[in-house]
Amino acid sequence: MLDILMAGGWAMAPILVCSAVALAIVLERWWTLRRKAVLPEGLGEEVRQWARSGQLDPSHLEALAAGSPLGELLAAALAVRNRPREQIKERIEDTGRHVVHRMERYLNTLGTIALIGPLLGLLGTVIGLIRMFMQVMGGGMADPTRMAGGIGEALICTATGLVVAIPAYVLHRYFRSKVAGYCIEMEKQATALLDELTDAATPLARPRRAASASTAG
C-alpha cells in the first residue's frame, strides 16, 4: 500500500493531508454532536420545573448554559424571563444562531475537502501523464508495457482523491442533517419553555389590571 501511495508522486501529499484533516473533523464532530451531549434526556422538563418552582439563581443558570447547547438556549430564555414574550423570543433566536454556528463548526472545511479531493487527484493524474509523455517524446519510454504502467501510476492520484472525497461528502451531509434535526428539537423545547414563562407571568398581570380598573372606578 505504501508503494502504491508513493507511486502517485508529490500530488499525493495534499490528498493525504486532506484525509488526515477530514478524519480529525469526523472524529471531533462525532464526539461533539452526540445526542446526550446536545440534547440531554429530560433537560427540557427539568428546566420547566425550575421555572415553576423559582429555582433560577445565577449558579443554576451558569451550570445550565455550560452543560449543553440545549441548556445554553434555555438559560438564555431564563435570563430574561421577566421581560415581554417578544423580547424573550428574540433572545432565544439570537442565542440559537450562535449555538447552531458552533454545532456546524468545521463542517464547511469537511465539505471543502469533499469538493477538492477529486480535483487534487485529477491534478496529480494530469501532471503524471504530462511527465510520462514528455519522457516518451524524449525517447525515454519506448516500451508500451512501461507506458501502461506509468498511466496506472498516474491514475493512483485520482483513485485516492475519490477515496478521500466520497466518505467526506457523505459524512458532511450526515452531520448537516443531524444538526438540522437537533435544531428542530431545540426549537420545540425552547417554545415549551417560552410558553411556560408566559403562562406564569399572565396571572400576575391580570390582578394588576383588575386593581387598576377598581381604582379608576
Image (tube, helix red, strand yellow):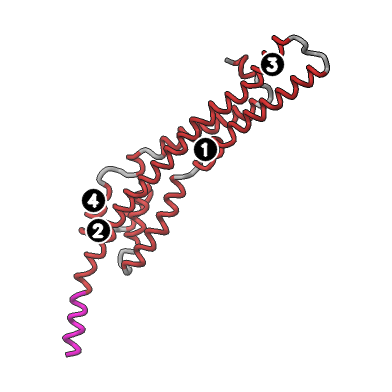
Find the magenta span and give its range.
206-217
User: Label 3 near label 4: C-beta < 8 Å?
Assistant: no
Disc 1 or disc 4, which is closer to the eye?
1
First-in-chain label (1 vs 3): 1
Tag nearer the camera, 4 or 2: 4
Residue at 53%, 31% in the rendered image: 165
Instruction: Give the Cα separation between the discs numbered 1 and 2.
Output: 40 Å
Type of amino acid under label 3 = Gly
Residue type pointed to by label 4:
Glu
Q: Is residue 23 above or below residue 209?
A: above
Query: Compared to 135, does 52 lie above or below?
Result: below
Judge left or right: residue 22 versus residue 4: left
- Front tag of 4 and 3: 3
Element on which disc 4 rests: helix
Which class describes the residues within 10 Å of circle 1: few (<14), some (14-19), or many (20+)?
many
| Cα gap from disc 1 to disc 3, whole angstroms | 32 Å
- Extreme residue toward the front, this view: 144
> Residue 216: within the magenta?
yes
Snapshot quadrant of residue 196: bottom left
Q: Residue at x 52, y 38 (%)?
A: 110
Quick one: SS at disc 3? helix
Q: Three-letter amino acid code at disc 1?
A: Leu
- Marks 4/2: CA–CA distance: 10 Å
Q: Can you tell which of label 1 and label 3 is closer to the viewer?
A: 3
